[in-house]
Image (cartoon, grey):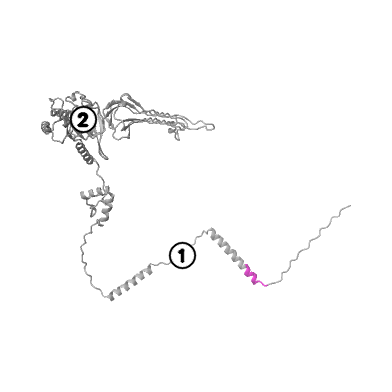
Amino acid sequence: MKFVDEAIIDIAAGDGGNGCVSFRHEKYKEFGGPNGGDGGRGGHVYAMADVSLNTLVDFRFARRHEAKRGQHGMGSDMFGAAGDDIVLKMPVGTIIADAETGEVLHELLTPGEPIMVAKGGDGGFGNMRFKSSINRAPRQKTPGELGEKRLVKLELKVLADVGLLGMPNAGKSTLITAISNARPKIADYPFTTLHPNLGVVRVGPSQSFVVADVPGLIEGASQGAGLGHQFLRHLQRTRLLLHLVDMAPFDDAVNPAKQAKAIVAELKKYDPKLFAKPRWLVLNKMDMVPKDERQARVNAFLKAFKFNGPVFQVSALSKDGCDHLVKAVFEHIKSIQVALAEPEYVDPRFVPGLELSGNELTPPSKESVQETRVLRENPKAAVKAVAKTPAKTSLKTPAPKPVVEKAQKPKVPKEAVKKAVVKKAAVKKATVKKAVTPKVPAQKSTVPSSKAKNSSGKAISLKKALEKKASVEKTPTQNPVPKKIPAKKSLPTRQVRQ
């Protein structure tokens, strides 16, 4: 597969759908009102980092990426559907920049995180949005907004912790093969490596780092000699550079120190920040140098190169010295990660040796913090340590307050005290009597309630019944005189003639 680390593509988000002008038409509904819906939004364009990709070759041939537009609004209060979004998968470490202005828009560093590159246009409003108390039949609508369109430049910078730097045939591909599972092309001619290779070096369980192998540099690469220095961009994210030097060149007339100085000069011309990165010297192919000449040749090289940093003597073919180099590199990267990481929050309540001085906390010592970390990693040891250590109070006892002696009062005889108490009680009693006011009877409400009316009516009827009974008892018993009933007068009969 061809390695491509640059591409220019044209992306376009979808336009928004237009609003609709419509009115409700039904039988027996003379004035149905507006029911035109809004248009749907256009589709967005997202970019996502994918760990399974390591090249931008997919975007070398497919240069146009356009999302669908939103659907137009319809009657019966129906809104248009939104356009489908598209997701462009790119390798981790891709930089997305505007091709016209050069402005960096996004940088894909987290796998699986979608980043919006172009936003779709919003849908237009239908006439139902414009109805009001004074505009019962609106005929207005708005068109959908246009989606964003951009010409984007993609640039890949691989994410690696360590970068290999050196002349062609210095043994960079052989070294990455010896310390990782990467299998780049290896041959006995220069410029065998034509594109960067990544390899994961595993030091132990959950201990690893990534190594990047780039094509070799030669003197004059800044002017286009060889493959140029375009691949040096892949070393800009690294934290450590390993400068490999061939200590057993094929041609005896080749000076390794002169070649190493040319590499450093080209590095400085390309990027001063890359030149300022930590750089270690790795002297490769030491197995091809006689044992009695190794130290003398190394000393002569260091004297001519004038290098004061760490130096390692290895043989990538026989793997001699590779383990020591890998462990040293891992410790260096781990120290950088710890320095850049955020400080771990430690709850002061569970740190041994932490004491309270007034209202402020005194910071614990380094030994107590280290002890806390050890106890966290080993819970059984933590339980034993808690059982052995006696309970201690962390609060300090407050300092005693100075005692101030009060002045002694003159003694008063008991009889005078009793008389004063009796007199005070009598005065208090008199004042209480004056303060008491007679109670004023509450006035009865003139408007009787329903219950009051019923009770008063019953009392009156009962009173009348009792009076009548008393009057009957007072009158003597006499025989009642029968009333005379007048006799009915007979009416004269009317004779009928026969």
**What residue did someone put label 1 on?**
441
Q: Secondary structure at mark 1?
A: loop
Q: Which residues make up the magenta segment?
A: 468-476
Q: Is residue 374 visible?
A: yes
Name the residue nearer the viewer: 322 or 102.
322
The numbered dot on residue 172 is 2
Dot 2 crowding, Cα within 10 Å, few <14, some 14–19, many 20+: many
Q: Assess whether mark 2 and mark 1 are in contact (beta carbons under 8 angstroms).
A: no
- Toward the viewer: 186 or 194? 186
The residue tagged with tag 2: helix, strand or loop?
helix
Q: Position of residue 270 (x, y in %)?
A: 19, 28
Decide: is 396 above or below 93.
below
Q: Percent x, y for residue 175?
A: 21, 32
How dense is the environment of label 1, judged by Cα within 10 Å: few (below 14), some, or many (20 and up)? few
Instruction: From the top left corner, tell me how far across and down residue 62 is, in percent.
Output: 33, 24
Which residue corresponds to the image point at 31% horizontal and 35% vertical from the top-left? Answer: 111
Query: Which of the pair 176/258 is nearer the observer?
Result: 176
The residues tagged by marks 1 and 2 sit, at their Cα atoms, a distance apart of 115 Å
Is residue 161 placed above or below 363 in the rendered structure?
above
In the image, taking residue 82 as reference, residue 404 lies left or right, namely left
Q: Residue 302's image quarter?
A: top left
The stretch drawn in magenta includes residue 134: no
Residue 41 left/right relative to 405: right
Furthest-right residue in view? 498
Residue 46 circle label: none
Q: Residue at x 54, y 59 (%)?
A: 451
- Please name the predominant secondary structure of the magenta segment in the image: helix
Which amino acid lies under the numbered mark 2 shown in the image of this protein?
A: Lys
**Residue 266 falls in which quadrant of the image?**
top left
